Image (tube, helix red, strand yellow):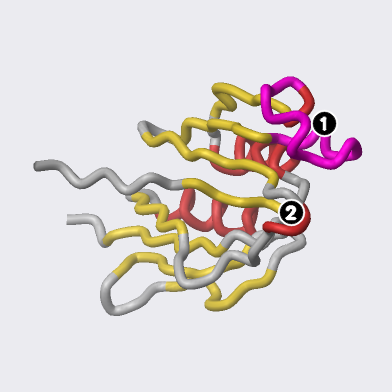
């Protein structure tokens, strides 16, 4: 048995901007974007939602992350989870942390801890909570 958590992020109309930001910050690659207006579900969205993302996929490292723009009446602020990035280079960990913190909110500054070379927590400008963990070199 293999457990593979499905990572699906919900945005308040800014999925495309978020994924472009993650491409830059995380070195990801947008693999697919489908707008509400170009989907069979176009009639379920308000007309001004036509250019918003119904389904997007970005690949970061060897992991796919799914995202979408929730319909205005269905959007819920992310809570009760964070996206964990495990890294092995403290300099890269700091670069990623400070990139994600751009116009976001730092919850725990990135620093050395008793379990990690670097650890920090940030909610990015799109409302997505992140934890950056950089293990000690062995």
Q: Residue at x 70, y 35 (%)?
A: 53
Q: Nearer the viewer, residue 18 or 93?
A: 18
| Label 1 element class | loop
The quarter of the image holding the C terminus is bottom left
Occupied quadrant, residue 56: top right
Question: Vertically, is 64 above or below 4?
Answer: above
Q: Nearer the viewer, residue 58 or 110?
A: 58
* Magenta span includes 20: no
- Residue wearing tag 2: 12
The quarter of the image holding the N terminus is top left
Which numbered marker is on residue 51? 1
Badge 1 crowding class, 10 Å Cα cut-off, few under 14, some 14 to 19, many 20 or more, is some
Q: Residue at x 52, y 57 (%)?
A: 94
Q: Nearer the viewer, residue 86 or 7?
A: 7
73 left or right of 138 in image = right
Q: Nearer the viewer, residue 13 or 113?
A: 13
Looking at the image, how many numbered discs can be counted on the residues?
2
* Magenta span includes 46: yes
Q: Residue at x 41, y 53 (%)?
A: 85
Q: Residue at x 55, y 34 (%)?
A: 27
Residue 91, given in percent of the width and then of the height, sits at 47, 52
Give the magenta part as a residue range.
38-53
Residue 49, given in percent of the width and then of the height, sits at 83, 39
| Label 2 element class | loop
Question: Vertically, is 89 above or below 48?
Answer: below
Q: Marks 2 and 1, how far apart in space?
A: 13 Å
Residue 64, given in percent of the width and then of the height, sits at 43, 34
């Amino acid at each position: 048995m293999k457990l593979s958590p499905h990572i699906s992020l919900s945005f308040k109309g800014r999925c495309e901007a978020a994924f472009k930001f993650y491409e830059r910050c995380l070195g990801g690659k947008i693999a697919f974007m489908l707008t509400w207006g170009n989907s069979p579900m176009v009639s379920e969205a308000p007309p001004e939602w036509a250019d918003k993302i119904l389904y997007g996929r970005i690949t970061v490292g060897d992991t796919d992350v799914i995202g979408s723009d929730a319909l205005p009446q269905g959007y819920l602020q992310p809570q009760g989870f964070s996206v964990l990035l495990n890294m092995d280079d403290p300099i890269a960990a700091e670069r990623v942390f400070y990139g994600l913190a751009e116009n976001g909110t730092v919850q725990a500054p990135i620093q050395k801890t008793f379990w990690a070379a670097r650890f920090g927590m940030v909610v990015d400008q799109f409302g997505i909570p992140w934890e950056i963990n950089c293990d000690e070199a062995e």
